[in-house]
Image (tube, helix red, strand yellow):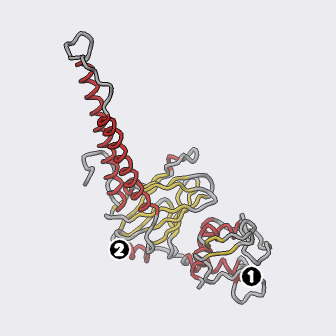
Amino acid sequence: MLLSFLPIPDQASTQAVSVDTLFLVFTALVVFFTVLVCVVLIIFSIKYTRGTKADRSNPLDGSLKLEIMWSVIPLFLAIGAFGWASHVYFEMVHPPADAMEIHVVGRQWMWKIQHPTGQREINELHVPVGRPVKLTMTSQDVIHSFFIPAFRVKQDVVPGTYSQLWFEATKPGTYHLFCAEYCGTEHSRMIGSVVVMEPQAYEEWLQSGTTSESMVAAGERLFRDKGCSGCHAGTSSVRAPILNGVYGGPVPLDDGSVVTADDMYMRDSILLPKKQVAAGFKPIMPTYQGQLSEEELFQLIAYIKTLK
């Protein structure tokens, strides 16, 4: 292990190696230049202290070569460090297209987790080893922060919006899960575990226990029960946007702008229907604010994604 000699968590994800390498190199650069400056400072302080016999004749007014060196070398080091850190960052915030999606809701003081197949967990997340996992997260009350030290990933979870985090676990085991943002009096108890399993064991876990309906099935039921199908289905007599094939595509708005129909657009369209009105339609849709939980919003969006 790269940093096994330091008291830090295991490297248990693909991101952990790149993050730790970056940390080690940055730390080495800081230590090197700190020691270099201190050593030179001490040597000159001793050599040129008052009363020493150091030659003080012909003092230098400056050195162009030295000034270029101490300007250009740190400049290239800084640019290189910025480029490297940016590469690591962009890899961490762009999940693979084939990542398995799991939905997370933070609330005082627990993590509520919903798998696509219907399994639900509280303060525990089961995932397979060697497979990218994307978490789509939101908060039910205040700002939280989803932090898995062994994976070197952390993401704020903010009410009223969706944030994403992804990782790929590299070895089975049980790893700590924390809330890294002070969220109230019981913040220190908002902890949990990430259980990384072999693929076969993970499939067996999915089949074990009580399994509720899948997120898509639950979303389809909500789509009917909440009256969405009465306006947005292909056979509807009400003039409203048809949702088949909408997700992921461009949506022209009545103000002339165009947005992408992503998760956040779908959420706003359900809770704040007058915020972004589709071009050619009147703002007559009622709001479902307070009528749907965060989990139900995830289910509705999961169903809308399947409409082709």
- Quarter of the image with the C terminus in it: bottom right
Amino acid of disc 1:
Cys
Query: Looking at the picture, how far across and down is residue 255, in whole percent?
Result: 74, 69
Q: Earlier in the sequence, mark 1 or mark 2?
A: 2
Secondary structure state at the residue bearing disc 1 = helix
- Quarter of the image with the N terminus in it: bottom left
Residue on which disc 1 sits: 231
Q: Which residue shows up at 36% across the image and 54% down it?
A: 19
Q: Nearer the viewer, residue 300 or 187?
A: 300
Q: Which residue shows up at 33% across the image and 71% down it?
A: 198
Q: Nearer the viewer, residue 92 or 58?
A: 58
Q: Quadrant of residue 197?
A: bottom left
| In the image, residue 85 above or below residue 229 | above
Secondary structure state at the residue bearing disc 2 = helix
Q: Nearer the viewer, residue 79 or 129?
A: 79
Circle 2 Cα neighbour tier, 10 Å, few/some/many (<14 / 14–19 / ≥20): some
Query: Looking at the picture, how far across and down is residue 83, in whole percent?
Result: 39, 54
Indicate left or right for 255 with 246 as reference: right
Query: Looking at the picture, how far across and down is residue 75, in whole percent?
Result: 37, 45
Q: Quadrant of residue 168?
A: bottom left
Circle 1 Cα neighbour tier, 10 Å, few/some/many (<14 / 14–19 / ≥20): some
Query: Looking at the picture, how far across and down is residue 187, in whole percent?
Result: 53, 47
Residue on which disc 2 sits: 199
Looking at the image, the residue that sits furthest to the top is: 51
Whether residue 218 is visible, yes or no, is no
Of the residues tagged 1 and 2, which is closer to the observer?
Answer: 1
Amino acid of disc 2:
Pro
| In the image, residue 164 above or below residue 203 | above
| Marker disc for residue 201 | none
